[in-house]
Amino acid sequence: MTMRHLRTTLDVVDRSALDGLMLRAQELKRHRSQRRLAPTLAGRVIAMLFEKPSTRTRVSFQSGSAQLGAHCIVLEGRDIWLQAKDNDGEVLRDTARVIGGAVDLIVVRPMSSHATVDELARHAGVPVINGLSDRDHPCQVLTDLFTLYERREHPYQSRMAFVGDSLAMANGYLALASLCGLELRLALPEGVAVDADLLRRAQSKANVMITHDPRAAVEGADVVATAAWSGPVAAGFRVDDALLQLASDEVTVLHPLPAHRGAEITDDVLEGPRSVAFQQAQNRLPVQQALLEALLH
Ligand code: CP
């Protein structure tokens, strides 16, 4: 089975496809640094539909596709009929058919529900990439794995802790655990529940723990990940030096950015030697280039 869309991280299909993406992203990153990227996407057109703000996703897709010879059209919600008021708008499936008929691939960041991603994929007739929904953030999750590839000898053998309330990241890491078997501990605040099917699937393939205690999740972890919260950060959930004392001495700290310094992570930790947040941000580009190639060839 080959990847047809990237609606969620699970669309990567299997470990072999995951390995292929990581290796190709490594190659693309190297080729870019040597200024010898080939125009593998020449003549292709990508539409990016953003109903919410984005810095990294938008810039890395635009720049990354241009570097490979593709053209990118960026559409914000207000640019098209989708969000028009007073019943003057267009239903999503009609917009999907029209945009899909004009371009080769669509990247979407929906305002609210992940259902927008699925509906586009059903009707557009071209591959669709989820640029962050309430269910998953596959481009970021795959980039986080790629960044671990660069930092750790055996990335799939990492003991990873996620401390936060982002269901997109928590669900994405669960999917990643089921694809590659990494050990995962999710420290989630009370009232935040991951997708039950994803959890069952991950627990059948990997060592996965869910807790409300960040200290239990971080104890001995090789990787500690966090992300911006949707509201105030729960007590004990800030990634700070005291929490990281419990982790492995060689711990790698992940943050997808944008960061709220002093909220989910301290300034010291974000800027310190354990953090790879800005390496992650740069890695969005080669990982998404590898995804575009995989979906467009
Ligand atoms: N990490 C991430 O997706 O960043 P943006 O919201 O800026 O795209």
Image (cartoon, rainbow, N blue to C red):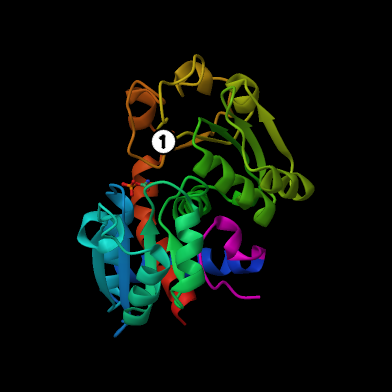
Estimate the x, y position of residue 211 in percent, counting from the top left: 66, 26
Name the image quarter holding residue 101.
bottom left
Residue 92 drawn at (x, y percent): 39, 63
Q: Quadrant of the N terminus?
A: bottom right
The answer to whether residue 228 of the structure is visible from this angle is yes
Question: Picture quarter containing residue 139?
Answer: bottom left
Magenta residue span: 1-15
On the question of residue 40 being in view, the answer is: no
Q: Is mark 1 on a helix, strand or loop?
A: loop
* Residue in the foreground of this view, choosing between 39 and 136: 136
Q: What residue type is labelled 1?
A: Ser
Residue sitting at the far right:
204
Q: Which residue is drawn at 31% across and 48% down?
A: 52
Residue 29 x/y as whole percent: 37, 65
Was residue 103 drawn as part of the magenta stretch in this picture? no
Residue that badge 1 annotates: 275
**Number of numbered discs on residues:** 1
